[in-house]
């Protein structure tokens, strides 16, 4: 059995919950998808056994301009825009 891990910073979590996902270039709607990356062997919670661990990352895709954005990229662009 594999461990599954998703981590967000507080800013990324807030953005994920409360902000509209809009492309910074063309203002089109972004579609959500998840990328899975193999991390390696890690211990599970409350366990001494090593298990294979996969990390999942949130990504957003714009169909109009065919670009991928990670949630951290969108948060950085939003913070730059607000300055």
Image (cartoon, rainbow, N blue to C red):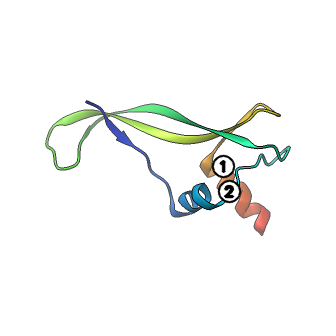
Tell whether 63 sits left or right of 59. Answer: right
**For mark 1, what is the residue?**
73
Q: Of residues 64 and 39, which is closer to you in this image?
A: 64
Q: Residue furthest left?
A: 48
**Number of marks in picture:** 2
What element does badge 2 sit on?
Answer: helix
Q: Position of residue 37 (x, y in %)?
A: 45, 32
Q: Residue furthest right?
A: 26
Q: Of residues 68 and 64, which is closer to you in this image?
A: 64
Cβ atoms under marks 2 and 1 closer than 8 Å: yes
Tell whether 16 sits left or right of 78. Answer: left
Relative to 50, residue 79 above or below: below
In terms of image quadrants, where is residue 80?
Answer: bottom right
Determine the residue positioned at 65% across, 56% down.
Answer: 75
Tell whether 8 sits left or right of 16. Answer: left
Q: Of residues 65 and 48, which is closer to you in this image?
A: 65
Q: Which mark is residue 48?
A: none
Q: Position of residue 16 (x, y in %)?
A: 59, 55
In terms of image quadrants, where is residue 67?
Answer: top right
**For mark 2, what is the residue?**
76
Q: Of residues 33 and 67, which is closer to you in this image?
A: 33
In terms of image quadrants, where is residue 62?
Answer: top right
Relative to 36, residue 19 above or below: below
What element does badge 1 sit on?
Answer: helix
Crowdedness near tag 1: few (<14), some (14–19) or many (≥20) residues, C-alpha within 10 Å:
some
């Amino acid at each position: 059995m594999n461990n599954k891990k998703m981590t967000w910073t507080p800013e990324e979590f807030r953005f994920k919950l409360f902000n509209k996902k809009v492309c910074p270039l063309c203002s089109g709607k972004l579609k959500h998808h998840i990328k899975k990356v193999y991390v390696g062997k890690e211990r599970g919670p409350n366990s001494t056994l090593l298990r294979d661990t996969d990390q999942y990352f949130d990504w957003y895709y714009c169909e109009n301009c065919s670009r991928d954005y990670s949630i951290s990229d969108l948060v950085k662009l939003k913070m730059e825009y607000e300055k």
